[in-house]
Structure formats: structure tokens, C-alpha cells
């Protein structure tokens, strides 16, 4: 009798596991179907109606906040100095492709500019991005609670896709800006050559992929904390 009862409990437990797996698979298929209906042109943020970035010559909006490294930063700290401001998400593949370029630009004396990064990933994925690319530049963390809306800083700067960058002149006015999904466009903006929004943009990274890549990056960060130390210049 006892054996029959135990067998029933085991069978019930097995059925619960199977049911859970089936529900997970169903939700995953619904998510994939939703992405398929959106099409490949849908961005991480709301669909872009057209050119929306700040125009060249416009005064840069206020930028201030605590960095992942700890200290508070603000544009006023670099008065009369050019600033390269990059917006990215750690789960975005093009954002990882320009990761090494950010450090090269920051340490190249021929450019003589301050590089600042604004990350819209969560804290762990942003820390992993900093360690992976050995960044010593200020990185502000602006995690987005609602993936359908921009973060506060990205909204002020009219950033609609990642990776995106602005070059600010010595008076902190927009000198150049655009999507920098590749080394060529990254260095064009760094040199003050604005990229026209009419050009073909790199394929945007959708929210579903970003969340999965975030999970992988966080897992890697938790598994190994032996990355390069994050330093504040």
C-alpha cells in the first residue's frame, strides 16, 4: 500500500515537471511569434519615425550622475574640452564591437577628448562589459525599467538606437553624431564627421535577444570576477 502511495506521488511530481516544461515552451513560442510579427526592423526602443537626433550646433542637454565606478560626473567637469558621449547596451552585439575602440579613443593623445559611456543595461551586465573591454573611462548606468521607453539621459539626447554617439565641441555643442554600429562609423563621429540618418543603419538588436544576452553576460560575470579592475581616470 505504501509503495502505491509513493508511486502516485512520484508520478504526480513527474507530471508537474512535464507540465512546467510545456508551459515554458508555449510562452517561448508566443514570444518568438510576437517578434516575427514585429519584423526585423523593430528596435529595442520605440519605432523611430525618422531622423531624431540632436542637430549639429545644438547645446548638449544636462548630463550628470554617478558612475558604475562610484564617483559623480558631469559635463561641467570637462569645460573647454571635447567630449565623446557613447550610448550602448551590453547585450547589443555592435556595442561590443566598439568596446575596444572606446578605450583606444580615450587614451589616444591625438584626439585629446574625454570619453563618457551611458549604459542602459543592468548593473551586473554593465560591470561585465567594463571588465571585458578593460574600460577606464566613466560609465554611467541607466538601466531601463520599461523597454518600450527611453532612459532619462537617452531621452534628453534623443537616442533611438544602439550604439549611438555624439561628439561635443569645446563649448559642449553637438559637433557630430549618429549610430556607430561599426568601427568605420565610430571613427567618423569621433573625427567630427556626422553620419546622415538617411544611410542604412545596422540591424537593431531586439529586446528578446538583449535579455538573453544580458543573462549570459551576467552569468559570466558571476562565474568569474577576475576581470580587469575598473578605474576612474
Image (tube, grey):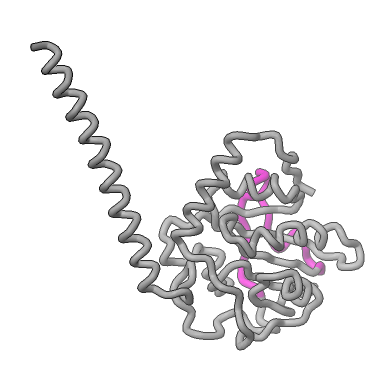
Q: Give the magenta-colored segment's residue range.
A: 60-81
Identified at 64% across, 64% down, the residue is 94
User: Looking at the image, which residue is at 76% across and 49% down?
Assistant: 136
Above or below, 106 relative to 6: below
Q: Which of the 4 quarters of the picture holds residue 38?
A: bottom left
The correct choice, above or below, for 223 with respect to 97 in the image is above
In the rendered picture of this protein, how many numbered marks are placed on residues? 0
Q: Is residue 227 above or below residue 193?
A: above
Residue at 66%, 70% in the rendered image: 181
Residue 194: x %, y % from top left: 72, 82
Q: Give the left or right position of residue 110, taking residue 102 as reference.
A: right
Q: State left or right for residue 158 relative to residue 130.
A: left
Return the residue nearer the eye: 15 or 147.
Answer: 15
- The answer to whether residue 5 is seen in the rendering is yes
Q: Is residue 66 magenta?
A: yes
Provide residue 201's location: percent of width, then percent of height. 60, 78
Q: Is residue 171 visible?
A: no
- Pick whichever, 162 or 110, lies toward us: 162
Q: Quarter holding the N terminus? A: top left
Q: Is residue 49 left or right of residue 200?
A: left
Per the image, is 162 magenta?
Answer: no
Which residue is the extreme one toward the left?
Answer: 1
Spot the residue most to the right: 110
At 55% from the left and 82% from the top, the residue drawn is: 52
Q: Position of residue 204 (x, y in %)?
A: 54, 70
Q: Position of residue 66 (x, y in %)?
A: 62, 50
Amino acid at each position: 500500500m505504501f509503495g502505491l502511495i509513493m508511486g502516485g506521488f512520484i508520478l504526480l511530481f513527474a507530471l508537474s515537471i512535464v507540465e512546467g516544461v510545456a508551459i515554458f515552451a508555449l510562452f517561448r513560442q508566443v514570444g518568438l511569434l510576437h517578434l516575427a510579427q514585429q519584423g526585423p526592423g523593430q528596435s529595442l526602443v520605440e519605432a523611430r519615425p525618422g531622423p531624431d537626433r540632436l542637430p549639429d550646433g545644438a547645446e548638449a542637454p544636462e548630463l550628470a550622475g554617478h558612475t558604475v565606478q562610484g564617483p559623480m560626473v558631469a559635463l561641467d567637469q570637462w569645460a573647454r574640452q571635447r567630449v565623446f558621449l557613447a550610448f550602448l547596451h551590453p547585450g547589443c552585439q555592435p556595442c561590443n564591437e566598439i568596446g575596444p575602440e572606446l578605450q583606444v579613443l580615450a587614451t589616444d593623445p591625438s584626439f585629446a577628448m574625454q570619453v563618457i559611456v551611458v549604459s542602459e543595461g543592468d548593473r551586473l551586465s554593465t560591470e561585465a562589459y567594463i571588465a571585458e573591454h578593460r574600460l577606464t573611462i566613466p560609465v554611467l548606468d541607466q538601466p531601463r525599467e520599461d523597454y518600450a521607453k527611453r532612459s532619462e539621459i537617452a531621452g534628453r539626447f534623443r537616442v533611438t538606437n544602439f550604439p549611438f554617439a555624439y561628439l561635443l565641441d569645446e563649448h559642449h555643442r553637438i559637433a557630430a553624431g549618429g549610430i556607430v554600429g561599426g568601427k568605420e562609423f565610430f571613427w567618423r563621429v569621433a573625427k567630427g564627421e556626422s553620419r546622415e540618418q538617411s544611410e542604412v543603419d545596422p540591424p537593431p538588436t531586439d529586446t528578446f535577444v538583449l535579455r538573453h544576452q544580458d543573462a549570459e553576460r551576467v552569468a559570466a560575470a558571476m562565474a568569474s570576477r577576475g576581470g580587469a579592475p575598473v578605474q576612474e581616470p
